[in-house]
Amino acid sequence: MQGLNTSLLRNVHAVLMHDLLVDVASLGAIRTKVVNLSGSTYIPNQVPAVLEEMFERIIVKAQHIKNPLEAAFFLWVNLAYLQPFEDGNKRVSRVAANIPLMLYNQAPLSFLDVDRDDYALAMMGVYEACNVSMAVDLFDWTYRRSQAKYKAVSGSLDSPDPFRVKYREALSEAVGSVVRRRQSMADAIASLELPAEDTARFQQLLAKELNILADFNCARYRLGMKETQTWIDEGRPGQ
C-alpha cells in the first residue's frame, strides 16, 4: 500500500501533538518512558527497541492488507494497543485508520458521534482481554454513519472541473510566472509546452484566475500578499 509508512505516521504524531508535549524531542519519536493507561490494568510494552520493531511490523502488515476497511481497523486497534508514543496514541490511531481509506478513495472515518463510554469500553476489551468484538461493532457502526454523512456532504458539492484538476500545477506555475517574473501570459503558457488542443482553454482559465487574483486569495498559488498587491498596483502586467 503505497503512501503508508512509519515516517508518515511519526509525522502525524508530531503534527497532532505539536505544543502539547513538554519535551519536543518526543514528537514523532518512539517513546522511552513508561506509559500507564488510567482505568486499565493493561501495561503496554516498555522496551523502546521492541516498540520500534512492533511499530514497523504493524505498518508493514497494514501495507499488505488489500481491503482498505480491514487495514483501517487493523491500524486503529493495533496502534492503540501498542502505545508507541509518549502520548496521543489513540489520536494517532484514529488518523492512521483514515490513511488506507484515503488511498483507496473511500469515505473517511469519523468518531465524532461516538459516546466516550462506548469508545472506552471498546478499547478496554482490546487492552484487557485482546478481544476486538466490541471494537468491531463500534467501528462498523461509526463507519456506516461516516459514510452516510460523507455521501450527504459530497452530494451537495459541485464536482471539480477535470480540466482544472489536470492542469492544477501548470496553472500555479503560470500564475507565478506572470506575477513574480512579470512574464506575459503567452510566454508563461509557451514555457509549459501544453498539448495544442488544450492551449486555448488553458489560456482562458489563466486569464480568469489572474483577473480575480487578490491579496486575500493568493496563497493558493504560493504567492505572498505583498508581492501580489504590488503586481495589482502595477496594473496587473502580463494579462
Image (spheres, rainbow, N blue to C red):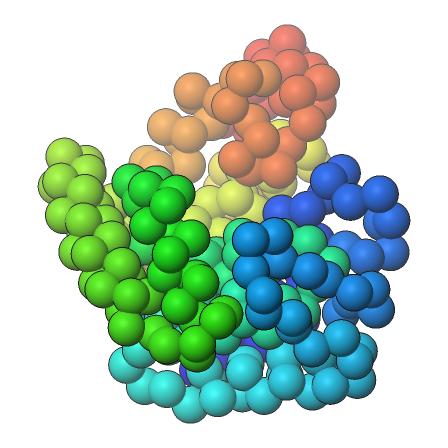
Closer-to-camera residue (210/33): 33
Q: Quadrant of residue 76?
A: bottom left
Residue 203 visible to the viewer: no
Q: Nearer the viewer, residue 85 or 214?
A: 85
Is 136 placed above or below 2 here? above
Instruction: Give residue 187's quadrant in the image.
Output: top right
**Who's the residue at 31% across and 78% down the image?**
70
Question: Residue 155, percent across and down?
Answer: 12, 41
User: In the rendered view, does 131 fall on the left or right side of 39?
Assistant: left
The picture places residue 201, in percent across and down from the top left corner, at 29, 45
Q: Is residue 172 visible?
A: yes
x%, y% of residue 56?
63, 84
On screen, residue 28 versus residue 165, left or right, reads right
Q: Say which residue appears at 18% left-offset and 43% top-offset.
A: 149
Q: Is residue 186 left or right of residue 118?
A: right
Write the residue at 32% across / 36% down: 204
Q: How many marks?
A: 0
Q: Quadrant of the N terminus?
A: bottom left
63 sits left or right of 151 in the view: right
Vertical placement of 164 versus 77: above or below? above
Could you say which is closer to the camera, residue 5 or residue 72? 72
Residue at screen point 79% across, 80% down: 47
As rendered, which of 195 and 111 lies closer to the eye? 111
Residue 50 sits in quarter: bottom right
Give x and y (percent) for residue 145. 18, 49
